[in-house]
Image (cartoon, rainbow, N blue to C red):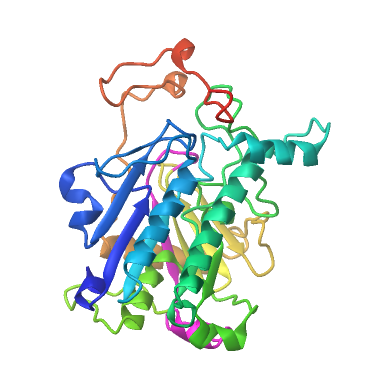
Amino acid sequence: ESLKEAGYTTGYVGKWHLGNAPEFQPEHQGYDFSVVIGGPHLPGKYRVSNRQDIKPKPGQYRTEFEGDLGVRFIEENKDKPFFLMISPFAVHIPLGAMSEKVEKYRKKKGDSDAELPNPVYAAMVEHVDDLVGRIVDTIEAQGLTKETMIMFTSDNGGLYRRYDYQPRIDDAGVTSLAPLKGEKGTLHEGGIRVPLIVKYPPVTDAKAGSTCSEPVISYDFYPTFVGLAGGNLPTYQTEDGRSLMPLLSDPNSRLDRNALYWHYPHFHHDRPASAIRERDWKLIEYIDGTGDVELYNLAEDIGETKNLVSEKAGRVADLRKKLNAWRTDVIARMPIPNPHYDPERAGEWWNMRDGKPVPSADRKPFPPTEKDG
């Protein structure tokens, strides 16, 4: 919405997990062009949910379809300022890739029985790489490279454990987050530390190939994009993020803030928890009623192997006080005790449409390639 006010044409393609009701769709959130896609990766398994006039080609892998839509948007809007966000479903479970790519990596793996490397997952990574390459090539072909910022990132860390309590062929041990602890859905580094690659030739060409160790977070993108577009942040909003432009100009600089915060009040992959990172120090506080706390020095222990709570009581008290004040300030929702919770039924599946349980016999694994389904 802020970019539209700054004169930009806006586009969205891919996964949209911000509500299913019409008023929550991207066309009502500031996007001029949007194609929301739901369902797994393989041909015939996914669908466009908000546009009846747009369909994939027969036999088309989902990431290739997302790439087609991104290329179309760029070509149609090359003569005006634009913002495009592509949110591919790959490499999310259920795993699935086109057989030609899977076979390529099966040959590389040879006769090894090891779970890693996983040829289907490797093929999916290549599908995403193809998508990124097409977008970069299209921007170059349209003569827009020197004035376009390209950003690549992810919404969470990898998944290395099965979380649905059912043996499946498509989500067991396909990734490794070593040396990081945790995974998607946890507040350890394996769950929240993600790639962030930025190319903006007017600024980054002079620093090409450099890395920056300053911690940043996804809500920093908002002031970065709006500022770059010459727009203004709404005065009624509290500015949580910081523009990344100073870091792009000088990777050794620091942003003007004291701490980063996370809040995940869900029993999903891990216990509900909140976290604060203040420079090298990170505190995780579990909010499941146990009162458990963990403290790590990430500069010395990126794997979060040594909990320093008992050694740093003063720092723990200080960080907990700041974390609690932040939760109060943002009106953070907290978990509500469920008196009907039964741990013996934690692995049950329920259909969201009819509210009925799904028997184990009805849960079929997704095919790994289009030739298996």
- Frontmost residue, 100 versus 215: 100
Q: Which residues are magenta?
A: 244-271
Residue 297 pos. (x, y %)? 62, 66
| Residue 328 in which image quadrant | bottom left
Please state which of residues 128 and 250 is positioned toward the viewer in this rendering.
128
**Image side of residue 156 versus residue 17, left or right:** right
Q: Is residue 85 magenta?
A: no
Q: Position of residue 267 (x, y in %)?
A: 42, 38
Residue 291 visible at all: no
Q: Which of the two residues, 356 or 208, is positioned nearer the viewer here?
A: 208
In the foreground, 343 or 62? 62
Q: Is residue 355 left or right of residue 342?
A: left
Picture residue at 52% right of the left edge, 32% below the top: 163
Residue ID at (59%, 30%): 368
Q: Position of residue 239 (x, y in %)?
A: 29, 75
* 256 vs 126: above or below: below
The N terminus sits in image quarter: bottom left
To which quarter of the image does residue 144 belong? bottom left
Up/down of 167 relative to 271, above or below: above
